[in-house]
Image (cartoon, rainbow, N blue to C red):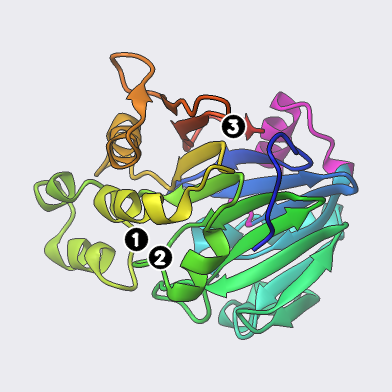
Amino acid sequence: MTDEGHGNRTLRLHILGSGSKGNCALVEGPQGLIMVDDGFSRREVLARMHALALDEHGVRALLLTHEHTDHVSGITVWHRAFPVELYASIGTPGTRRYLDELPFCQFVPGVSFEVAGISVRTFPTSHDVVNPVGFRFDCAGDSIGYATDTGYLTDDALDALAGARILALESNHDVPMLRCGSYPRYLQDRILSDSGHLSNEQAAEAAPRLVSERTEQLVAMHISQENNRPSLAVRSFAESLGASLDDELGSTATLERGDGPSLRIRAAGQNRPITVD
């Protein structure tokens, strides 16, 4: 883990969408953009990128977290139009014929490599797929931690995510909402399992261990539209970290730190692209 100084903002995170209907994010560094997953149509990705004033020709590589459709359905069409380097964990491309036909560079979870001047550290997550991973991105003293679609945080994940300036962490569901909701019991059990998704409570429990004085942005990711609310995820993080809500709706929260940088807590959405810097 790099010991970053305050105020170094070499990297930015653009979240085009995060949720069960599609996932795509972009890490921006000095040499271009790294796309993380692509579960949207090319037209939708372009529209959302342009809404954030991003140039599609700046994408240098595409990394996969895992093979579920909401993370990979747009890759073939995107790569046909914009052929970039493709990275996935060993075995992931082989789970779908259309992925297996693409020129993926396959890696073992836990390795690190460099893309577009950014050091990419991979780590295993826990999901009901072949070889799921999360990422830590480091460049010139700045860092982004990115982890979604995991039933719990592995020791490697906790180590990799700790102290990142921008932390994008899954906070998928509120357990009472899930248990009282419309999902069948087998699906509820799958979501709650060690190979499912992080709940608000699990994410909030991990937050004090991951957030350091260097962390300036905490983003709740992959929020269920059926079994959660953005405000619940934000409130859960805020309570665990001693942050104050910025408004009665609980849409954002802030932890003031005196002379140091404040920590802002917010939620990523399914339909609203955002830039986190």
Residue 139 higher or lower than 65, as above or below: above
Check contact, mark 3 vs mark 1: CB within 8 A: no
* Alpha-carbon span between mark 3 and mark 2: 22 Å
- Could you tell which of marks 3 and 2 lies nearer the N-terminus? 2
Q: Badge 2 local density, few (<14 within 10 Å), some, or many (20+)?
A: many
Q: Where is mark 3, residue-wise?
A: 273
| Along the line of sight, the residue nearer the viewer: 142 or 225 | 142
Check contact, mark 3 vs mark 2: CB within 8 A: no
Q: Which residues are magenta?
A: 37-57
Residue 266: give its label: none
Which amino acid, by three-letter code, is at mark 1?
Answer: His
Q: Residue furthest top?
A: 247
Which amino acid, by three-letter code, is at mark 3?
Answer: Pro
| Relative image position of residue 209 (x, y in whole percent) | 41, 56
Residue 159 higher or lower than 254, as above or below: below
- As helix, strand or loop, the secondary structure at mark 3 comes to loop
Query: Left or right of 51: which side holds 172?
Result: left
Check contact, mark 1 vs mark 2: CB within 8 A: yes
Residue at x 13%, y 63% (from the top left corner) = 185
* Alpha-carbon span between mark 3 and mark 1: 22 Å
The label nearer to you, 3 versus 2, is 2
Q: Where is mark 1, residue-wise?
A: 197
